[in-house]
Image (tube, rainbow, N blue to C red):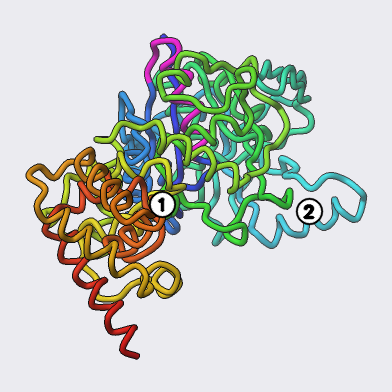
């Protein structure tokens, strides 16, 4: 069975690049009926925070990237790492290194001066003398001195690294805590991970880790190193390019499936198709069509994809994600129409849920002022008569339904010999407060009869006051 994992470090927010890695891992497992694991790599005790852990869990929950196992915390597995290190010692494949920071700096400076690649020179690899006083040793792995490591990467293709290019990596710090390279190998072995999917910034670690798998006599997983996500200017994506935390996109009104749709296309394609449901992604995703080159983040394209998902989402799904934004705007959703109906009506006019929430306020909140430009154009003295006729016609409608509202508007226009725009636009401004809304009959139906009549009276009073001025 295929088993993949997402293994973020809780030293900051869950960023966009990490989400894409999680998504590719999740999709690959789903595609082949496998399992997806969430592992929290929190061995960096100084930088790991509970706040970051919560941000990761909240982000994964919002994205609906459900995991079959986890979250598993590396800090709960220290005994297991120590056990493996002891086994490596027993095999003669690990050793204490007593090199002080000053000694290492001096070693690297000398290598640079000679034009050599700075690397640990193995000076304590076979040390049998008396340990120097006052130095808390690290533990290093005895990397093979000869041969080569061959990586058959699912994205990069064949990568060959000669062992003589690798030094003896640290597998435990001087305080005894395991390093990333040790703990990740032990975890992937113990958890039966078959495919390691991660950013290509980890490619340099892979030959070292493969040597560790072999030293532990553990099965070696397959690797897929995916390119970095770059900013729009081609540099590494960072805060200066805008939002990079996944939860910021939630706050900005993006649907989770739209963000995932955008991210899956940052490096993967299926013909010319742009819009995918999660089920389609899971059915189609494979590494055969993952591009080996970095992709640039395009916020305009993301917003367009979000717009398409808003148009296609079910009304219930839209309303569920829209509700927090309405509450944030101070709306009492009990004092107005069903939010599903509002979301359904506004879906074709919004690029984000933030936009949709702001355009939906008049369904739940009354107002005392009109948009200045819209009022100047449409609430003029000439609009008083059609609005008065509408007030009379709409107040006696037995059924407050869009078809009857439309007929009443049409009849007033016909009786006054006016075009529908001369009646409909003043009505729109009167009942919504502005000049933009979906079809006025559908809008009026959802606003409700009592609110519409009250707002018509407000508009007539506004016009009368304007005439007096």
Q: Which residues are magenta?
A: 19-35
Residue 414 vs residue 195, the one in the foreground = 414
Residue 161, by quadrant, is: top right
Magenta residues, dominant SS class: helix
Determine which residue is flagged by label 1. 419
What residue is rendered at 24% in x and 51% in y? 444
Q: Residue furthest bottom?
A: 469
Q: Image height check: is 34 above or below 50? A: above
Measuring from the top left, give residue 117's x and y in whole percent: 83, 44
Measuring from the top left, give residue 465's x and y in whole percent: 28, 84
Residue 264 vs residue 119, the one in the foreground = 264
Magenta stretch containing residue 20, yes or no?
yes
Give the label on residue 69, or none: none
Residue 130 vs residue 165, the one in the foreground = 165
Is residue 136 toward the left or the right of residue 201 in the image? left
| Disc 1 crowd, CA 10 A, few/some/many (<14, 14-19, 20+) | few
Return the disc, 2 or 1, that comes first in the chain's sequence.
Answer: 2
What residue is rendered at 43% in x and 35% in y? 309
Determine which residue is flagged by label 2. 108
Q: Secondary structure at mark 2?
A: helix
Q: Secondary structure at mark 1?
A: loop
Is residue 321 toward the left or the right of residue 148 in the image? left
């Amino acid at each position: 069975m295929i088993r993949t994992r997402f293994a973020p470090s809780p030293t900051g927010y869950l960023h966009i690049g990490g989400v894409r890695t999680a998504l590719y891992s999740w999709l690959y497992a789903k595609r082949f009926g496998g399992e997806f694991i969430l592992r929290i790599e929190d061995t960096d005790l100084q930088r790991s925070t509970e706040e970051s852990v919560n941000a990761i869990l909240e982000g994964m929950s919002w994205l609906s990237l459900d995991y079959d196992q986890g979250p598993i915390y590396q800090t709960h597995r220290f005994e297991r790492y120590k056990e493996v290190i002891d086994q490596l010692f027993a095999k003669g494949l690990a050793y204490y290194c007593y090199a002080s920071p000053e000694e290492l700096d001096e070693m690297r400076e000398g290598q640079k001066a000679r034009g050599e690649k700075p690397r640990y020179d193995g000076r304590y690899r076979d040390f049998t003398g008396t340990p120097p006083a006052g130095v808390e040793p690290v533990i290093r792995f005895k990397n093979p001195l000869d041969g080569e490591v061959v990586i058959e990467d699912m994205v990069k293709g064949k990568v060959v690294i000669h062992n003589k290019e690798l030094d003896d990596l640290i597998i435990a710090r001087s305080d005894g805590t395991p390093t990333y390279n040790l703990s990740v190998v032990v975890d992937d072995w113990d958890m039966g991970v078959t495919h390691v999917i991660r950013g290509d910034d980890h490619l340099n670690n892979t030959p070292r880790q493969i040597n560790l798998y072999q030293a532990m006599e553990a099965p070696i997983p397959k690797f897929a190193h995916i390119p970095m996500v770059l900013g729009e200017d081609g540099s590494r994506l960072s805060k200066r390019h805008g939002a990079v935390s996944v939860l910021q996109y939630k706050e900005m009104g993006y649907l989770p499936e739209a963000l995932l749709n955008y991210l899956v296309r940052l490096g993967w394609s299926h013909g010319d198709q742009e819009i995918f449901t999660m089920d389609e992604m899971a059915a189609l995703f494979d590494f055969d069509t993952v591009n080996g080159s970095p992709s640039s983040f395009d916020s305009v394209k993301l917003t367009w994809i979000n717009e398409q998902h808003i148009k296609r989402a079910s009304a219930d799904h839209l309303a569920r994600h829209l509700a927090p934004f309405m509450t944030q705007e101070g709306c009492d959703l009990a004092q107005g129409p069903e939010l599903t109906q509002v979301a359904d009506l506004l879906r074709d006019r919004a690029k984000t849920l933030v936009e949709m929430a702001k355009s939906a306020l008049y369904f739940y909140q009354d107002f005392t002022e009109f948009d200045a430009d819209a009022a100047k154009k449409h609430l003029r003295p000439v609009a008083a008569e059609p609005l008065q006729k509408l007030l009379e016609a709409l107040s006696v409608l037995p059924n407050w339904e869009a078809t009857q509202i439309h007929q009443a508007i049409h009849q007033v226009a016909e009786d006054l010999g006016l075009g529908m725009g001369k009646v409909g636009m003043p009505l729109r401004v009167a009942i919504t407060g502005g000049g933009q809304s979906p079809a006025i009959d559908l809008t009026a139906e959802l606003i409700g009869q009592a609110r519409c009549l009250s707002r018509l009276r407000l508009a007539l009073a506004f016009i009368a006051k304007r005439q007096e001025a």
